[in-house]
Image (cartoon, rainbow, N blue to C red):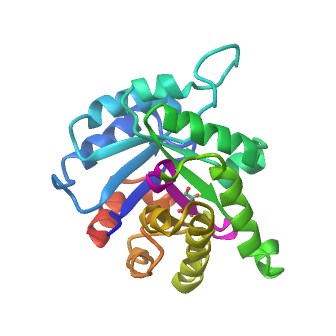
Amino acid sequence: MRKPIIAGNWKMNKTASEAISFVEAVKNNIPANSAVDSVVGSPALFLQSLAEAAKGTELKVSAQNCYFENAGAFTGENSPAAIADLGVQYVIIGHSERREYFHETDEDINKKAKAIIANDMTPIVCCGETLEQREAGETASWIKGQVENALDGLTNEQVANLVVAYEPIWAIGTGKSSSAADANETCGVVRETIANKFGQEVADKVRIQYGGSVKPENIKEYMAEEHIDGALVGGAALEADSFLALLEAVK
Ligand SMILES: O=C(CO)COP(=O)(O)O
């Protein structure tokens, strides 16, 4: 049985005090030994205070990006070693917004995945197709390529323990969510790609999230699908009440 994982991705939202208020409102409302892993993805600025505030609770903290070197002359970047040292457990990598606006390549994402794992954190590796690719029938081949490239050179154990988030770009922040059946089909492509490269046992363990206009009202439909083990949520994870409602719907 794969444990469900619900992760919020705040993107570039919130001030420090808003971020702390969220964590204070959420952290003690997640039952101990919860049946769901709960993660909040914060801008780097607040990681330290959020990791301190969430320490010892069921709420885990995620970064939204990091660099692939631990130290050096990389002005403006954030070291995975320094992020891990704060008590952060996850890092989202390869989000379509980072690929589009900051020109991240599959090769960067692969290096980041390795650096995150080397620092004992868990990567949440994002993949997803554009509307043009979907309409041209290229979704499966595109996702296969993104997943193969992002995970290249990792060991079976490393892949079994990471998280892949499938986020069709046309469903992000648009209110146009993918149907649960379509999302499941493509999450199935992710699992099959991993099975072909790392073996069925690894593919059976890896957790795959769907992301794109997920909200408390529709999350159950996704979670009922065979290959969907959780969600990566933007807008509906910004407010504590809504985030808790997502967890409540899944537990
Ligand atoms: O990009 C997303 C999460 O990473 C999805 O965002 P929305 O839930 O706002 O569509």
**As rendered, which of 210 and 197 lies closer to the eye?**
197
Task: Single out the residue that lies furthest toward the top.
Answer: 73
Q: Residue at x 65, y 68 (%)?
A: 168
> Magenta includes 219?
no
Total marks shown come to 0
Q: In the picture provided, is 133 more to the left or to the right than 89?
A: right
Residue 79 in picture, x, y percent from top left: 56, 24
Residue 6 in picture, x, y percent from top left: 39, 59
Q: In the picture provided, is 18 more to the left or to the right than 184?
A: left
Task: Answer above or below: position of 194 versus 8.
Answer: below
Residue 41 in picture, x, y percent from top left: 46, 45
Task: Answer above or below: position of 190 versus 222.
Answer: above
Find ligand 1 in the image and state its quadrant: bottom right
Q: Residue at x 41, y 24 (%)?
A: 85
Which residues lie in the magenta part?
Answer: 157-171
> Magenta includes 159?
yes
Residue 43 visible to the viewer: no
Task: Single out the residue that lies furthest toward the bottom.
Answer: 181
**Image quadrant containing the N terminus:** bottom left
Q: In the picture provided, is 115 more to the left or to the right than 233?
A: right
Q: In the picture provided, is 30 more to the left or to the right than 236?
A: left
Task: Answer above or below: position of 248 versus 63.
Answer: below
Q: Residue at x 46, y 56 (%)?
A: 160
Residue 209 in picture, x, y percent from top left: 49, 64
Residue 243 visible to the viewer: yes
Task: Single out the residue that lies furthest toward the left.
Answer: 32
Q: Residue at x 39, y 41 (%)?
A: 61
**Image quadrant containing the C terminus:** bottom left
